[in-house]
Amino acid sequence: MKTQIISVDGNNIDKDVMRRAGEIIKKGGLVAFPTETVYGLGGDALKEESSGKIYRAKGRPSDNPLIVHICRMEDLPYLVEEVPDTARRLADAFWPGPLTMILRKSDKVPRTTTGGLDTVAVRMPMHRAALAFIEAAGGYVAAPSANISGKPSPTLARYVAEDMDGRIDMILDGGEIGIGLESTIVDLTGEVPVILRPGYITKEMLEGVLGKTEVDKALSDSSPAQPPRAPGMKYRHYAPKGELTIISGRQEQVVEEINRRAREKRQQGEKVGVIGTEDSVEYYIADSVKCAGTRKDENTIAKALYRILREFDDEGVTVIYSESFGEPEGSGIGQAIMNRLFKAAGHHIEYV
Ligand code: TXA
Ligand code: MG
């Protein structure tokens, strides 16, 4: 299959391009598209064959459900048994935006889309090109992140192409993604709302609208006794090829420890990469030192993280050390950053 790559501009939508992309979806094909979080790999959410194609293109286990993307609040009732009051309030506050809600599904949504579950994940993204594309595609686009399963989610169309060239019909290239980490997922099917995946919309923001909100226990406990409630969170995700270790502590000590380890590994013939920030990168000595942004604005770190992990892969880095960026229980987007970094590191963190 030949994959077409077409540039799109959220501020200047080319209706003809969107119509063509929408036609592909309606005919059962696949189109990757930009959202404000990461690139998505879209197919018709209401067609069984389309979700099957998505799973195959990603090499993803089919028990890992897809998020259904919509572009209008009026389209939500079609997908779900009922729209609870909590969902309306969250939609008012955060849609369109980087928030996914888990609700009880209607019989219109095939089980292939939901990985066999009775619930469905729904999100209305904010990126204008995403909204135009979803509308052109008929309103219901199932889309996981547009990476091969197990690789970091793509924040640039180049990385979508690297993973999906020849496997899908079209890539809509909207340039670099703004947020850089996947949406927050909140489960609204129980008594108390539960965060299944942290993201840009934080626990504090959700509590501001809903009151008490819990975090899935499996997110802070890595023991297999506690399986995560979002099936996708159980897989070793976001994994770079190099072996990643997080070193946490006071900055000077972290720098010293990482440099010591880097020297040792390089002597053993490893190619060493380091992830630091504006405040620290100049002090590191390794084969490849990357600046993830500034601690003064953690959004810069969220945006850079997946790109850096992919760059290390491209450079053939075999051992990676990263600074720690706040604790998993911390507030703000730091929690989401650490959640992804922990997974990329296979939970390997050391304190100095
Ligand atoms: O930001 C995002 O959410 C991106 C963009 C493209 O919208 N999409 C994304 O999709 O990250 P994906 O498939 O890579 O991650 C979806 C996560 C998986 O961990 C999956 O298990 C979980 O959502 N999920 C989907 N449906 C669910 C359901 N009914 N119940 C629990 N978890 C669900
Ligand atoms: Mg993903």
Image: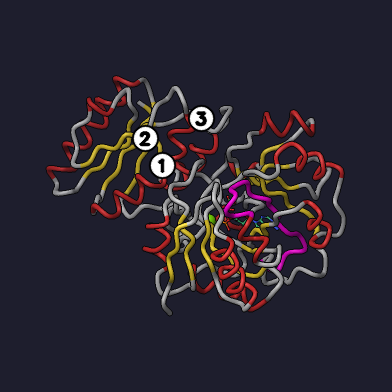
Choose the circle earlier in sequence order: 3 or 2: 2
Q: Residues within 10 Å of mark 3 (few under 14, many from 20)?
A: some
- Which kind of residue does numbered mark 3 sit on? Glu
**Measuring 73% from the left and 48% from the top, which residue is drawn there?**
187
Instruction: From the image, tell me which residue sits under label 2.
Output: 292
**Measuring 54% from the left and 45% from the top, which residue is drawn there?**
222
Q: Is residue 343 inside the magenta stretch?
A: no
- Which kind of residue does numbered mark 2 sit on? Ala
Quarter where residue 95 is shown: top right
Instruction: From the image, tell me which residue sits under label 3.
Output: 327
Residue 64, above or below 193: below
| Contact check, label 2 and label 1, Cβ < 8 Å | yes
**Badge 2 element:** loop
* Extent of the magenta region: 115-131
Q: Residues within 10 Å of mark 1 (few under 14, many from 20)?
A: many
Instruction: From the image, tell me which residue sits under label 1.
Output: 305
The yes-or-no answer for disc 2 within 8 Å of ligand 1 is no
Please indicate whether residue 273 sits to the left or right of residue 250 in the image: left
Image position, residue 326 (x, y; %)? 48, 28
**Badge 3 element:** loop
Image position, residue 69 (x, y; %)? 66, 57
**Closest to the observer, 51 or 23:** 23
**Badge 1 element:** helix
